[in-house]
Amino acid sequence: MAMREDRLLPADPAVRPVARRLYEAVRNLPIISPHGHVDPGMLLADEPFTDPTALFITPDHYVTRLLHAGGVTLDRLGVGSPAGANSRDAWRLLCENWALLRGTPVRYWLETEFADIYGITERPSAANADDLYDRIAGAAKRPRELLDGFGIEFLATTDDPADDLAPHRELARIVKTRIAPTFRPDAYLEPARPGWAEKVERLGAAADTDVSHYQGYLAALESRRRYFRANGAVSADHSHADARAEPVDNPDRLYKKALTGDISAEEGAAFRRHMMLEMARMSSEDGLVMTLHPGIFRNHHPGSFERYGPDTGHDIPTTVEFTRALQPLLARHGTDPGFHLVLFTVDATVYSREIAPLAGFYPSVYAGVPWWFLDNPSAIRRFQESVTEIAGFSRLSGFIDDTRALCSIPARHDMSRRLDAGYLADLVCTHRLDEDEALETLTALVSDQPRKVFKL
């Protein structure tokens, strides 16, 4: 498991030296992480990491889903169990089943984390599982210690609109990293889902606003967005079954039906699509960057959802369409000064067909980089070619790590920097860019572009 210095750089001996020079110039630049799911409460508590399973396995659905596919049930990996329960057994299962990770980015990230944080370069196996467990547990690291050591300049979390954001305010006093909340209103925009009326009541209480009518509901959302802005938020994040944004003639009527629980699934979808237009309007007015990543079949396996809850590895991609779906939204706001819309997808066919052309015309639209099921070297290379040749580098979001696992953040960003360096080096060696242009572009992708797109 030796960590080769040139890992992921091009194998072509003519291109690799150029890629190496480019990568070395950016490898230690600060990390900007504008979308992720690290728990701010964990950072505030700053309890030392003494449990390797709680650090590397349980919070990372990338890991648990692959092991589950190989026959390891989620409960044996600590999912849904109290912290520390069966921790060593779960770690042994990871090491015994290390071969299940071959060829995946998950293995690359874990190897990088083990080596860079704990100095571990041995390949995990059944034979050394206990030794590795003890070495990690014995070299306890605190979350804020890791945060400082990783060189993370900006870290966005994902938060419920009704949250009071107290951990963010306290962290702003005591850490160097800027830790910003992200406004995630999905649950409040889906009125056909169970418990929606209770959620809206909670939203109204947080905003101190009467939400018994539609205008009050809008006012509550606007109020909470202002609250998030005042607490450092830069973006509002949205993920629904599709990307459609369409007006309805009478949203008040649908809202009243939703409050009584008398709304159909079709009416609920129509209301949510109308609300995507309202979300865009609000982003145009208050400046929160609107990020959109539709096309996920959430909680695909009912039995796992009932037993372990959401975000446990069985969210599965579906096809998605953007061009027609977003036309009403972009007709209204696509050229609004200051409106930023970042489009992500887990449907790899959409990048060159729809997202790149949209980003290549609308000044508000940026192509979100590959993530989730596409944040692997081969998919990233395809994205680099298919999107930049249509829209250019200036229309990219910058790298997004989208992770709950704190220790994986630098490994993911390092992978992106290596792959971008390799792609740009190839452009240099095929005489499409000069090396100084490639370096300027790579530096922009790492630092300038995410600052610009997310208004940092």
Image (spheres, helix red, strand yellow):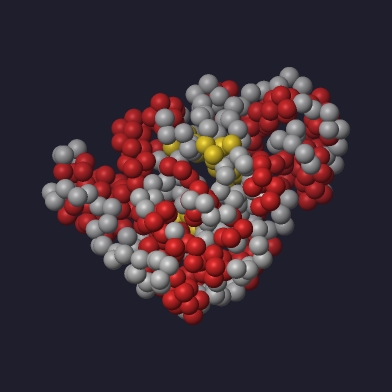
Q: Is residue 6 left or right of residue 159?
A: left
Query: Going 62% across and 41% down the picture, which residue do you hit?
Result: 301
Quarter containing the N terminus: bottom left
Residue 33 position (above or below residue 338)? below
- From the top left corner, tell me how far across and down residue 126 is, in percent: 43, 67
Residue 331 position (above or below residue 406)? above
- From the top left corner, tell me how far across and down residue 335 is, in percent: 51, 29
Residue 250 showing in the rendered view: yes
- From the top left corner, tell me how far across and down residue 280 is, in percent: 61, 34
Q: In this orientation, which residue lies closer to the viewer: 281 or 247? A: 247
Q: Residue furthest top?
A: 249
Q: Is residue 321 left or right of residue 162?
A: left
Q: In this orientation, which residue lies closer to the viewer: 290 or 402? A: 402
Q: Is residue 178 left or right of residue 108?
A: right
Query: Going 41% across and 72% down the picture, which residue do you hit?
Result: 128
Residue 142 position (above or below residue 370)? below
Q: Quadrant of residue 241?
A: top right
Q: Residue furthest bottom?
A: 138
Residue 116 showing in the rendered view: no
Query: Going 46% across and 74% down the picture, which residue do you hit?
Result: 130
Query: Going 34% across and 69% down the picture, which residue do you hit?
Result: 121
Q: Is residue 323 left or right of residue 78?
A: left
Q: Quadrant of residue 21?
A: bottom left
